[in-house]
C-alpha cells in the first residue's frame, strides 16, 4: 500500500468518524429524562456486542493475531477502564453543571496531551502545532461561552466541573495507552478487549450506584444507547483508535475539538436551533486552530 493511499485512507476514516461525534449531544438530548449511568452502560455494552461477530470471524479465519502479547492485556484493561470512566464522568457532569462549562473543561485534553507527549516521549512539535492547539481550545472556550444559558442554578457546579475535568484527564491517559498498544495490534485486536473492559466498568458503576435497572426500560433510552454505540463509539472512537497507530494523539485530540462545530451545524438542520452570532466566530477560530495544528509538510503529521 502506498504512503499516499495510506494517508488518504486515514483522513477518510477520520472524516467519517469525526462527523459521527457531532450526533452524540443531539442523541443524548432525547434521553436526558433518564439515568445517565444506564445510558452509558447501554452504549458501551451495545458497542461491545456489535463487535462480537467480527471478532469471532477473524479469530476463526486467523486473519489477525488477536492473542495479547506480554503486558498488552494489562494495558488494554487499563485503557478500557479509563474509557468507561471517561464516558461515565462526562455524561454525568452534564447533570450537575452547565453544558457550556462541561464542554469547555472536557476539551482541555489536547493541551494535556501535547505536554505529555513532549515530556514523556520527547516528541518535538512545530510552533504552529502549539499555537494551533491553544487557538483551537480558545475557540472551544468561546463556543462554550456563546452557548451558555443564563440559568443561575445548577445542581452542583463544582462537582460537575470536576467531573468534566477528570473526564478530560482520563481521556488523555486512554489515548496515550492506545498509542502504545496499537503499534503491534490490529484495530479489532485492540478495540474488542478495550470496549469489553469499558462496558464492564460502566455496568459495575451502574450496579454499585443505582442497583439493577427496572425490567421496563424506556425504548427511547435503548435506541439512543444503540445510536451512541454505533455512531460516536464504533465509528467515532473507532476511527481514532485506528488512526492513533499512525498519527500523534495530540493531533487527533485537537481534531476532536471540531465535535461542537459539527454538533452546532447538525442541531440547526435537525433540531432547528439557530446558533448565537458569537458561535460563528468561535467555530471559525476553532477551525483555524485545527488547520494550524495540521499545517505540516506532506507526511509529517503521520508517523513513519
Image (cartoon, helix red, strand yellow):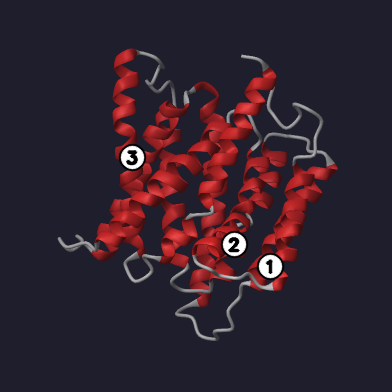
Distance from the alpha carbon under mark 1 to that under mark 2? 9 Å
Horizontal relation, residue 89 to residue 201: left or right: right
Give the quadrant of residue 222. bottom left
Q: Badges 1 and 2: C-beta atoms under 8 Å apart?
A: yes
On the image, the x and y values in percent for residue 199 come to 33, 46
Distance from the alpha carbon under mark 1 to that under mark 3? 36 Å
Quadrant of the frame with the C terminus: top right
Kindly identify the residue that appears in the image at 53 percent across and 68 percent down.
272
Kindly identify the residue that appears in the image at 52 percent across and 35 percent down.
241
Q: Which mark is residue 264?
A: 2
Q: Is 244 located above or below residue 218 in the figure? A: above
Crowd band around label 3 with a 10 angstrom C-alpha radius: few (<14), some (14–19), many (20+): many
Q: Secondary structure at mark 2?
A: helix
Q: Secondary structure at mark 1?
A: helix
Q: Closer to the N terminus: mark 1 or mark 2? A: 2
On the image, the x and y values in percent for residue 142 come to 70, 67
Q: Closer to the N terminus: mark 1 or mark 3? A: 3
| Closer to the camera in the image, 250 or 48 | 48
Residue, far bottom: 152
Can you see residue 82? no
Name the residue that disc number 3 marks. Answer: 48
**Which-is-in-front pick, marks 3 and 2?**
2
Kindly identify the residue that appears in the image at 67 percent across and 42 percent down.
250
Name the residue that disc number 1 marks. Answer: 279
Q: Secondary structure at mark 3?
A: helix
Distance from the alpha carbon under mark 3 to that under mark 2? 29 Å
Crowd band around label 2 with a 10 angstrom C-alpha radius: few (<14), some (14–19), many (20+): many
| Closer to the camera in the image, 9 or 183 | 9
Amino acid at each position: 500500500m502506498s504512503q499516499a493511499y495510506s494517508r488518504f485512507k486515514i483522513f477518510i476514516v477520520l472524516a467519517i468518524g469525526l462527523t459521527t461525534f457531532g450526533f452524540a449531544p443531539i442523541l443524548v438530548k432525547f434521553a436526558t429524562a433518564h439515568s445517565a449511568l444506564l445510558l452509558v452502560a447501554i452504549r458501551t455494552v451495545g458497542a461491545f456486542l456489535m463487535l462480537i461477530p467480527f471478532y469471532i470471524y477473524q479469530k476463526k479465519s486467523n486473519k489477525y493475531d488477536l492473542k495479547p502479547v506480554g503486558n498488552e492485556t494489562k494495558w488494554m484493561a487499563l485503557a478500557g477502564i479509563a474509557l468507561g470512566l471517561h464516558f461515565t464522568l462526562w455524561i454525568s457532569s452534564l447533570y450537575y453543571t452547565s453544558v457550556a462549562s462541561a464542554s469547555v473543561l472536557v476539551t482541555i485534553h489536547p493541551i494535556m496531551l501535547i505536554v505529555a507527549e513532549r515530556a514523556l516521549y520527547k516528541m518535538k512539535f512545530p510552533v504552529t502545532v502549539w499555537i494551533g492547539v491553544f487557538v483551537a481550545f480558545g475557540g472551544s472556550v468561546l463556543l462554550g461561552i456563546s452557548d451558555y444559558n443564563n440559568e443561575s442554578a445548577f445542581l452542583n457546579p463544582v462537582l460537575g466541573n470536576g467531573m468534566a475535568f477528570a473526564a478530560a484527564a482520563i481521556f488523555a491517559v486512554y489515548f496515550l495507552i492506545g498509542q502504545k498498544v496499537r503499534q503491534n495490534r490490529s484495530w479489532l485486536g485492540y478495540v474488542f478487549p478495550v470496549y469489553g473492559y469499558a462496558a464492564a466498568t460502566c455496568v459495575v458503576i451502574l450496579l454499585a450506584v443505582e442497583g439493577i435497572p427496572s425490567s421496563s426500560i424506556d425504548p427511547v433510552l435503548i435506541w439512543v444507547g444503540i445510536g451512541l454505540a454505533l455512531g460516536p463509539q464504533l465509528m467515532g472512537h473507532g476511527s481514532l483508535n485506528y488512526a492513533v497507530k499512525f498519527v500523534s494523539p495530540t493531533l487527533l485530540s485537537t481534531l476532536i475539538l471540531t465535535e461542537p462545530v459539527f454538533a452546532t451545524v447538525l442541531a440547526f438542520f435537525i433540531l432547528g436551533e439557530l446558533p448565537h452570532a458569537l458561535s460563528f466566530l468561535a467555530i471559525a477560530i476553532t477551525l483555524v486552530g485545527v488547520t494550524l495544528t495540521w499545517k505540516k509538510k506532506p507526511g509529517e503529521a503521520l508517523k513513519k
